[in-house]
Amino acid sequence: MLELLGMFVLALLPIIWLVVALCGLHMEAYKASVGALVVAVACAMLGWQMSAVNVATAALEGFAMAIWPIVIVIIAAVFTYNLTVHTGAMETIKHMLCSVSSDKRILTLLIAWCFGAFLEGMAGFGTAVAIPASMLVALGIQPATAILACLIANGVPTMFGSIGIPTTTLASITGIDAIQLSTTQALQVFPFVIACPILIVTLVGGGARALKGAWPVTLVAGLSFALPEIAAAHFIGPALTDVVAAVCSLVVTFAFALSQKGAQVPEEHCLRGSLSDDGINETVAEDVRAWSPFILIFVVLLLTSKLFPFINGPLSSIASTVNIYAGDPTATLTFTWINTPGVLIMLCGIVGGVIQKCPAPEMLQVFRDTCKQMSKTVVTMLGVLACAKIMGYSGMIASIAAFFVGTLGAAYPVVAPLLGALGTFVTGSGTSSEVLFGNVQLQAASSIGADSTWLVASNSLGISAGKMLSPQNIAIGCAACGLVGKDGEILGKLAKYAFGFAIAMAALVFAGSLVLA
């Protein structure tokens, strides 16, 4: 037992380093991730006698997996958003969203919940907190309240964020079918999706009394997201799940709010001087032009999904399969060169820029600025995925799983979502958490005879709680709303929501594992 404990602690050292570096030393994520890679290399070679060649090729496989498809989709998605800001189209989008009501509860649902989820689905990496939070502050919402609302709203969509990269990455490293995995994830997160709009309205309205008169729109916002999310996950796959759910929720909630526009808004929930009063009147053509990159992305990703096999098949066949890791000739990595979200989003972003009449030199400059902006995130992804590959191939991940299974046995599902939450809290990334703990969940499921898809999906469920408390996410919100240095205050206020979610998630996963067993 002592040997099991010792190997467990040694295997956890890269994760412990990340916690200490990020939370204790306040180190930037890209530096912490490089440090974690160094720690993983040392542990793998000393504790598991992994050869230098195997360590190097495992890290190289991690680098390759990070660059394609993860980094390419990060660059493409953020480039598309930055281009929309550059052309001024984002102002049109903001005005459209804010013209529907003077009720701050409804506006917060539309902006933080619906539009925030759309941004998470398209770009992720902080855009879904920074943009909606700054919009809410511009409307008159208190900065701290705006940040809290957006952080709560940003949790549950994270598993399908950035065109489904966290889930597709998890499916790739565990070998579980992406459709099967995403469907299970959507079912697990369903009750928490319904709960989020309720919490947001309670928060922005100053207590549970804010739900009076707002129950209908709150339930509409939750259900119009949760039900399409399950359908999209099952029939399309993870890439468009967030986008489909967010668009449905945005349209349905917007229409419902318009139907209530003549109703009296209680004075304490009424915002004066919102963007709906500034006298701007866009034409339909201007509205469509503003949304064109996102419309194109939605249509193109839908048409190239498995829903249309006569398109998906030929495009997906343009791929290369290689073996990088020297320790296992059967360990292969497949690069899909055209039908991958990053390439498709980049093409749609460029076409959208042309529609918005952005000159080519300016578009190129936006791309350069985006690459510079995301350079540290790219380094973070390279470090984390290389670290994860070394931990996986060396046997470190197996040691972590063995300890939890050996000490908890059939009770392991209780901690399964908590590992996902820990990974996201530490790295700030749902994808990184999936990479770090995806195989732990898979091996644990195999050891205790639990349903592997259910347990692996629970890692994604835990991400929803961890994302709320992620120091990186909180810092982004504080920077966007002028509250730099107030991170600790926001963290303290968020803790009750995140821990409440984590406890409920642990209970759900444990109960589900008993039923499926």
Image (cartoon, grey):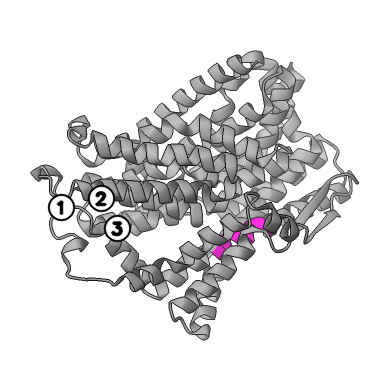
Which of the pair 185/414 is nearer the observer? 185
Label 2: how many residues lie within 10 Å, few (<14), some (14-19) or many (20+)?
many
User: How far is the residue under mark 1 from the one under mark 2?
Assistant: 9 Å
User: How far is the residue under mark 3 from the one under mark 1?
Assistant: 14 Å
Amino acid at circle 2:
Leu
Q: Are marks 3 and 2 in contact (CB under 8 Å)?
A: yes
Report the side of 173 relative to 434 (left or right). right
**Residue 456 highlighted magenta (yes or no):** no
Amino acid at circle 3:
Leu
- The residue tagged 3 is 97
Range covered by the magenta-colored residues: 68-76
Q: What secondary structure do most residues of the magenta stretch adopt?
A: helix
User: How far is the residue under mark 3 from the one under mark 2?
Assistant: 8 Å
| Camera-side mark, 3 or 1 | 3
Q: Which residue is drawn at 42% across and 45% down?
A: 154
- The residue tagged 1 is 271
Report the side of 103 relative to 286 (left or right). left
Q: Are marks 1 and 2 in contact (CB under 8 Å)?
A: yes
Q: Which residue is drawn at 37% across and 38% down?
A: 222
Secondary structure category for the residue under label 1 = loop
Q: Which circle's residue, 1 or 2, is located before the other in the chain?
A: 2
Q: Residue 107 shows which numbered tag?
A: 2
**Residue 75 highlighted magenta (yes or no):** yes
Q: Which circle's residue, 3 or 2, is located before the other in the chain?
A: 3
On the question of residue 101 being in view, the answer is yes
Return the residue found at the far right.
329
Q: Do the residues labelled 3 and 1 touch (CB within 8 Å)?
A: no
Q: Residue 460 shows which numbered tag?
A: none
Q: Which residue is drawn at 49% across and 26% down?
A: 505
Question: In the image, residue 116 lies at what x, y percent?
Answer: 39, 51
